[in-house]
Amino acid sequence: MAALAVVIGHCSERLWPEYARFSASYFGAGMFGVFVFFMVSGFIIPASLERGRSLGAFWVGRFFRLYPLFWGSLIAAMVLYAAGRFSLQSGFAADPVLNLVTNATMAQFFLGAPDTQVIGAAWTLTYELAFYMMVSLLFLAGLNRRSVPLAFLALGLILPAGLLLQVRMVNGPEANLSGRVLVVVATVAIAVFFARRAATGRGAVAAVLLASIVVPLVLNQPGPSGYTTAIFATMFVGTVLYRMTAGEIGAKLGWGVFGFAVCLIFALKLLQQPYLDPHTGAVVTWKKEAITIIGAYLLFGAALLLRRYAFPRPLMFLGRISYSLYLMHALVLQAISPWTVSVAGIPATWLTWGAWMIGSIALATSTYYAIEKPCQDLGRRVIAKMDARA
């Protein structure tokens, strides 16, 4: 449902200016979808890491789950670009080789300017990657099960981060010496803290490596710092709900954290100053993000309450191909040209919308079976060999 919301939102915003203004002012289907994704990641990733396997096995699984398909989407985008069927963002041409390598890391949204991304929707994967590193650090330090205080800490940092932290503190146009010193100090402090809590020497080395990557990345985020913190807070709220379903904390505490997060987001959005959306000309008030983000929370909460019931098979199938659908629809929206004439009384815009939706699902199905699933299976075999050697 989250992936489908993203595709519907992106298709509709391209075709109907009225919908684009509605999306900017009241409810963004794309933002709704990605916040559901963030909740899902917060719920799933700790469970994946804590199955009794090693940290190395976790990262091997994540690599084969994410990178082959992501690299495939980058290659496909370059091929389509060469054929004149895909446009790259303005900043990419400044240094195409460096920007392509940067995109291939999956940390592109934090490493470079936002207008150097090949697949625009892939900005969320940078947050996912950073969250994996955060969870890994907590795992090494034995703090991974303290999800309730971690969620409250992240939620409590939303407002201070938004007020105090500048964007792109490492290589941004306004980056300065004091900001870079702060990044270095924060990186060293966090690396030392987690290294000292690690149970083994290898764990300490891994903690230093992870901290040295994730702290500068997160502090170099290009968007509003409060928004970035809200994303990570959402993931940690998802982790709290996982602890609840696993029986590690009570239902009252789990739903209490969930409810507190919803109320806090609503209260913080009330403080948001209206601004003019540069793409649609719509005035954006507190309503858009409050309705959209809280809606994502409520959908996830409702699905969690209904988890004992069977979901419709089409939705289950879309769930399996959701990662492919998320990446591939960006290619389809450019590769398939819009209809220019009506057919059998059906407006051209609706024909285009249908072609984009069907094309996205069809391509995602193909890439799931051709790339994503075989690579996941390969990852499982590699992990099995690692377990056997251990």
Image: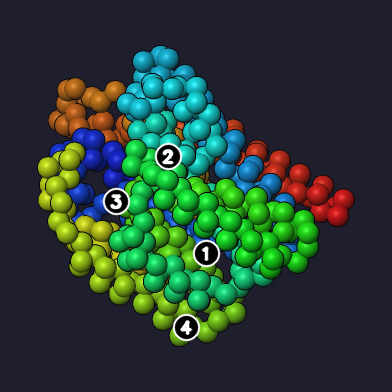
- Among all residues in the image, which is located at the extreme top? 83
Q: Is disc 2 placed on a helix, strand or loop? A: loop
Q: Residue at x 57, y 61 (%)?
A: 189
Image coordinates for residue 18, horizontal then vertical, percent? 13, 43
Compared across the picture, whether 377 is left or right of 162 comes to right
Q: Residue at x 27, y 35 (%)?
A: 353
Viewer-nearest residue: 40 or 178: 178
* Residue under numbered circle 3: 29
* Residue under numbered circle 2: 171
Q: For residue 344, which quarter of the picture?
A: top left
Instruction: Judge depth for marks 3 and 4 and give the one in front.
Output: 4
In the figure, 83 relative to 54: above or below? above
Mark sitting earlier along the chain (2/4):
2
Viewer-nearest residue: 301 or 169: 169
Q: Residues within 10 Å of mark 2 (few under 14, many from 20)?
A: some
Q: Give me the C-alpha separation between circle 2 and circle 4.
A: 41 Å
Q: Residue at x 36, y 77 (%)?
A: 260
Q: Residue at x 64, y 42 (%)?
A: 64
Residue type, mark 1 in image: Phe
Residue 4 visible in image: no
Compared across the picture, whether 349 is left or right of 136 comes to left
Image coordinates for residue 291, horizontal then vertical, percent? 24, 62
* Residue under numbered circle 4: 253
Check the picture and name the quadrant holding the N terminus.
Answer: bottom left
Check the picture and name the quadrant holding the C terminus.
Answer: bottom right
Q: Give me the C-alpha separation between circle 2 and circle 1.
A: 32 Å
Mark sitting earlier along the chain (3/1):
3
Instruction: Judge depth for marks 2 and 3 and give the one in front.
Output: 2
* Residue under numbered circle 1: 43
Image coordinates for residue 322, horizontal then vertical, percent? 47, 46
Q: Is disc 3 placed on a helix, strand or loop? A: helix
